[in-house]
């Protein structure tokens, strides 16, 4: 985690509220709409909301904002819960806005009784036209002066299912000349004959966002209701409704929505990628979703660290995805177990090595506090990476070349004596000799070499599939880019290496293990992996190579 930092503006507000004795403790909520999977923007909101109640006294509720019946699904609810838990947070209560439908209906009735809401039969076009413009006041609806009794009866009939979708709405009676367009008699209930994932067919009228959110906050005694900047103009309505209903005074605070370079963070757009088969589902390892990042091999620690470092802002800006990758490398370097995998093999025969196997010891993680080792078999035939050999090597090539020496990691120094080629002139094998007194850890050979290569024993290697991921988009600032965001899909975002060769210890890999494949990057087992076919995802490269690649 990052070093102590000063309080952000919301923390300052809370700190003051507590000092002034406005509250004894605070209550926040994370209110996802269950119409998609959580992404990095949500992670930022989760870390903020849960982080606040960890830092100050209090708790955080998980509230599913499920007031829109047509898009919400139980699958999303389950995945959202899994993602929050995986990120490392615990909610106090699991609530659903739909649990409040009765209360919200009663609140609406209260408004009607106080002559603060009316049933409007106008079409949606008529309502929109009547709203006026930011510079011109709206006009009162022809139905604005209905009596309380008439409104109560009509609203009850709306609830009873007497009218088709769109026939009537309930509007708050505020001010058609307000400078805030949202205060010009906003719609608070609409008719929608649709099945709801929790309430089934009990309801055919549903509250609008503005009439559900603040009221739900109030029902839960939320002290600080934090949302993104686009809700600033809604705050006046939020406060008005709470005041008119005389219910618990929750307060709304806004921070800037998080945008991250080279990716999109709108559920609507992410859903398009899923539906159009551009990615392999919501948890495709290239997706900016929590489940995608998890499958890719991200750790919760690295995501929390990232959210902590970017903090919160009052203005929208673009956060460099390189920072997320930096946080990831920082954490993986500490926790990832080192293993050797050859992606593109070149056979090396060690001519002076006896037949049979020698079991060597390879260190699991030089960064760990306790140094542990695992067995690695060495034998007469090994694979090295094809790119680690060059026939006509330049002076500064410290890998293998004819007549040159290198160290094999955790094993011996070898020297290349002969290059074997097929009829087409392709290199098929190298013949080398090894120095028996050069074993890592007990080297008395006195030979100094500059390069160390990773390798695997041919007889012991396990064939695995490797999936190399790159950014899903080629454009840094997708929101500002011309045309459709899908015009910027990176055609090379997935490169599958069907047959790579792993050291045998990787046969026991589990889904929560984190690996560094020496010199190749950080990897994890993919969730679609089976015992017969191990699949590894490249989580991130060892270094940031992206900037360089872009210049090619
Ligand atoms: P999307 O546009 O992706 O559908 P949303 O805001 O509609 O996002 P919700 O499920 O309504 O998604 O969001 C739950 C919470 O997460 C809200 O409080 C919202 O403000 C917050 N949130 C969503 N996206 C971001 C983001 N990019 N940055 C910060 N907070 C976000
Ligand atoms: Mg939303």
Image: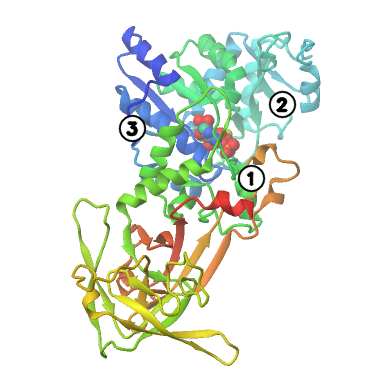
Location of mark 2 (residue): 168
481 versus 174 height, above or below? below
**Which is closer to the viewer, label 2 or label 3?**
3
Nearest to N terminus: mark 3 or mark 1:
3
Location of mark 1 (residue): 269
Q: Can you see residue 95?
A: no
Return the residue nearer the eye: 552 or 260: 552
Q: Quadrant of residue 414?
A: bottom left
Report crowding for label 3: few under 14, some 14 to 19, many 20 or more residues within 10 A (C-alpha).
few
Measured in 3D between alpha carbons, the distance from the residue under mark 2 to the one under mark 1, in whole angstroms, is: 31 Å
x and y percentages locating residue 31 in the rendered image: 48, 32
Location of mark 3 (residue): 92
How many discs mark residues in the rendered view? 3
Left or right position of 377 against 262:
left
Report crowding for label 2: few under 14, some 14 to 19, many 20 or more residues within 10 A (C-alpha).
many
Q: Quadrant of residue 510?
A: bottom left
What residue is drawn where x is 44% and y is 47%?
78
Query: Mark 3 falls on what kind of element?
Result: loop
Query: Mark 2 falls on what kind of element?
Result: loop
Nearest to N terminus: mark 2 or mark 1:
2
494 versus 108 height, above or below? below
Query: Mark 1 falls on what kind of element?
Result: helix
x and y percentages locating residue 489 in the rendered image: 66, 53
The C terminus: image quadrant: bottom right
Left or right position of 45 against 335:
right
Residue furthest bottom in the image: 423
Q: Quadrant of ligand 2?
A: top right
Q: Can you see residue 280?
A: yes
């Amino acid at each position: 985690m990052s070093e102590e930092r000063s309080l952000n503006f919301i923390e300052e507000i809370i700190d003051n509220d507590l000092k002034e004795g406005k509250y004894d403790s605070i209550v926040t909520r994370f209110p996802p709409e269950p119409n998609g999977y959580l992404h990095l923007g949500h992670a930022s909101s989760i870390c903020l909301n849960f982080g606040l109640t960890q830092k100050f006294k209090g708790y955080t509720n998980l509230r599913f904002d499920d007031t829109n019946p047509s898009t919400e699904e139980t699958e999303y609810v389950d995945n959202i819960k899994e993602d929050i838990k995986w990120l490392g947070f615990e909610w106090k209560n699991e609530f659903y806005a739909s649990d409040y439908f009765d209360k919200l209906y009663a609140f609406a009735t209260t408004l009607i009784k106080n002559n603060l809401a009316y049933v409007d039969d106008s079409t949606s076009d008529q309502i929109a036209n009547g709203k006026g413009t930011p510079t011109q006041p709206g006009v009162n609806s022809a139905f604005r002066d209905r009596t309380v009794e008439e409104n109560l009866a009509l609203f009850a009939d709306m609830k009873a299912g007497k009218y088709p979708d769109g026939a009537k709405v309930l509007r708050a009676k505020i001010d058609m000349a307000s400078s805030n367009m949202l205060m010009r008699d906003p719609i608070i209930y609409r008719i929608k004959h649709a099945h709801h994932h929790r309430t089934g067919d009990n309801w055919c009228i549903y509250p609008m966002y503005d009439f559900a959110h603040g009221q739900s906050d109030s029902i839960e005694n939320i002290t600080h209701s934090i949302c993104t900047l686009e809700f600033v103009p809604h705050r006046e309505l939020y406060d008005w409704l709470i005041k008119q209903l005389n219910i618990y005074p929750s307060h709304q605070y806004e921070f800037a929505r998080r945008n991250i370079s080279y990716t999109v963070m709108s559920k609507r757009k992410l859903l398009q990628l899923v539906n159009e088969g551009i990615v392999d589902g919501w948890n495709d390892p290239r997706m900016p979703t929590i489940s995608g990042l998890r499958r890719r091999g991200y750790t919760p620690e690295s995501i929390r660290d990232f959210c902590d470092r970017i903090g919160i802002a009052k203005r929208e800006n673009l956060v460099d995805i390189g920072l997320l990758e930096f946080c990831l490398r920082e954490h993986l370097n500490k926790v990832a177990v080192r293993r050797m995998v050859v992606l593109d093999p070149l056979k090396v025969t060690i001519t002076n090595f006896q037949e049979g196997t020698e079991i060597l010891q390879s260190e699991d993680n030089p960064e760990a506090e306790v140094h542990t080792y695992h067995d690695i078999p060495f034998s007469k035939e090994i694979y090295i990476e094809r790119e680690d050999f060059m026939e006509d090597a330049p002076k500064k090539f410290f890998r293998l070349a004819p007549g040159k020496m290198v160290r094999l990691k955790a094993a011996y120094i070898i020297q290349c004596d002969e290059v074997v080629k097929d009829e087409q002139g392709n290199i098929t094998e190298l013949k080398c000799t090894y120095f028996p007194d050069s074993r890592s850890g007990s080297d008395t050979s006195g030979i100094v070499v500059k390069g160390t290569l990773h390798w695997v024993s041919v007889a012991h290697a396990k064939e695995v599939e490797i999936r190399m991921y790159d950014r899903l988009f080629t454009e840094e600032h997708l929101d500002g880019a011309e045309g459709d965001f899908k015009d910027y899909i990176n055609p090379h975002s997935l490169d599958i290496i069907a047959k790579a060769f792993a050291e045998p210890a990787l046969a026991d890999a589990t889904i929560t293990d984190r690996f560094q494949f020496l010199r190749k990057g950080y990897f994890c087992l993919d969730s679609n992996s089976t015992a017969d076919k191990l699949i590894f995802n490249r989580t991130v490269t060892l270094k940031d190579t992206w900037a360089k690649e872009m210049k090619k």
